[in-house]
Image (tube, grey):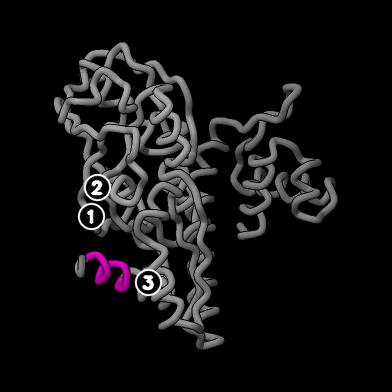
């Protein structure tokens, strides 16, 4: 069995088509089909069901896919380690940063790191926390920021901050003069939410369900300032992290604590367990941890 066979197999599954996969792999379709056929003969199993109109992975193929992904991730880690040894550079890495978190904490830390580590190559990838976790597991990102909890069997976890989500309502809202509110009291409200794929969406929805209701979502966005503006206009209620609100224009809004349940917003640096980390990525983790210890 060759690494090339596994790469071709995964690309066919990803594209759902031999023709599309051959284009991505820059090879001919007959050559690709031959590689997959050889792999099937070697394993003595059919990897794809070709009898249907659309190519479908077989049950055996699905089991192999999980193992093939792990093998390729390990190979990629090996290649990164070999490359760093060969060229003797400090390394490069991709840092996953959810947008709502990035604007609150990281600009000054990133500037410090780039000033003190000018030879490193840090690429910043903005993705929602849930999508970022998938990217970490697939090896597309090296280190990321997550909203806890995460699967600590899959990730190394370094907590960096503990905060809460707060409720933002228009100054014209009936709750505007309250200091706090129980989640169950919001069951008839229109919720302004971060888009699905963001951990905050799930966190708020879970708190609503815990309080006995499914939230009515009036609008979704990836931008906290848009949600804040919508709340100012009394288009609904928004939930934003403490740190975001510390820097925001809070004129014409009221900020309330949420109780029963509290909605925690605890952040951590995470990376895939047993994955290769370049020297640069390790130094970045140290810099971030020191920055948050100093606050």
Q: Which numbered dot is residue 284?
A: 3
Q: Describe the element under mark 3 as helix, strand or loop.
A: helix
Q: Describe the element under mark 1 as helix, strand or loop.
A: strand
| Most foreground residue, 61 or 123 | 123
Span of residues in magenta: 286-292
Q: Residue at x 66, y 58 (%)?
A: 4
Instruction: Residue 295: give x, y in percent of width and height.
Output: 21, 65
Say if 144 sits above or below 67 in the image: below
Return the residue at label 1: 161
On whether residue 287 falls in the magenta region, the answer is yes
Task: Work out whether mark 3 precedes mark 2 in sequence or the reverse, and give the earlier one.
Answer: 2
Q: Residue at x 24, y 47 (%)?
A: 266
Instruction: Residue 286: give x, y in percent of width and height.
Output: 30, 73
Task: Estimate how packed mark 2 is, as few (under 14), some (14 to 19) or many (20 or more) residues with alpha carbons within 10 Å.
Answer: some
- C-alpha gap between disc 2 and disc 1: 6 Å
In the visual, does 221 lie left or right of 154? right
In the visual, does 181 lie left or right of 187? left
Q: Residue at x 33, y 69 (%)?
A: 285
| Most foreground residue, 62 or 122 | 122
Circle 2/circle 1 CB separation < 8 Å: yes
Quarter of image, res 158: bottom left
Return the residue at label 2: 266
């Amino acid at each position: 069995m060759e690494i090339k066979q596994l790469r071709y197999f995964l690309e066919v599954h990803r594209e759902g088509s031999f023709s599309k996969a051959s284009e991505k792999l820059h090879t001919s379709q007959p050559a690709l089909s031959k590689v997959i056929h050889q792999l099937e003969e070697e394993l003595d199993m059919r990897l794809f069901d070709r009898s249907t109109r659309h190519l479908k992975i077989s049950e055996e193929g699905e089991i192999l896919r999980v193992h093939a992904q792990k093998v390729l991730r390990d190979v990629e880690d090996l290649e990164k380690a070999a490359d760093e040894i060969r060229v003797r550079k400090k390394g490069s890495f991709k840092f996953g940063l959810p947008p709502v978190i990035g604007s609150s904490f990281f600009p000054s830390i990133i500037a410090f790191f780039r000033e003190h580590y000018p030879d490193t190559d840090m690429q910043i990838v903005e993705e929602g926390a849930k999508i970022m976790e998938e990217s970490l597991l697939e090896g597309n990102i090296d280190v990321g920021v997550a909203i806890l909890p995460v699967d600590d069997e899959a990730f190394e976890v370094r907590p960096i901050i503990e905060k809460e989500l707060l409720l933002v309502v228009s100054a014209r809202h009936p709750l505007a003069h309250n200091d706090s509110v129980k989640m169950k009291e919001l069951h008839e409200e229109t919720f302004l939410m971060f888009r699905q794929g963001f951990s905050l969406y799930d966190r708020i929805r879970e708190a609503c369900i815990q309080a006995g209701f499914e939230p009515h979502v009036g609008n979704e966005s990836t931008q906290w300032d848009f949600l804040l503006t919508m709340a100012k206009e009394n288009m609904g209620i928004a939930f934003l992290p403490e740190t975001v609100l510390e820097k925001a224009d809070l004129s014409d809004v009221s900020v309330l604590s949420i109780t029963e349940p509290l909605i925690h917003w605890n952040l951590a640096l995470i990376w895939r367990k047993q994955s290769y980390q370049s020297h640069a990525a390790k130094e970045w983790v140290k810099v971030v941890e020191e920055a948050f210890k100093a606050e």
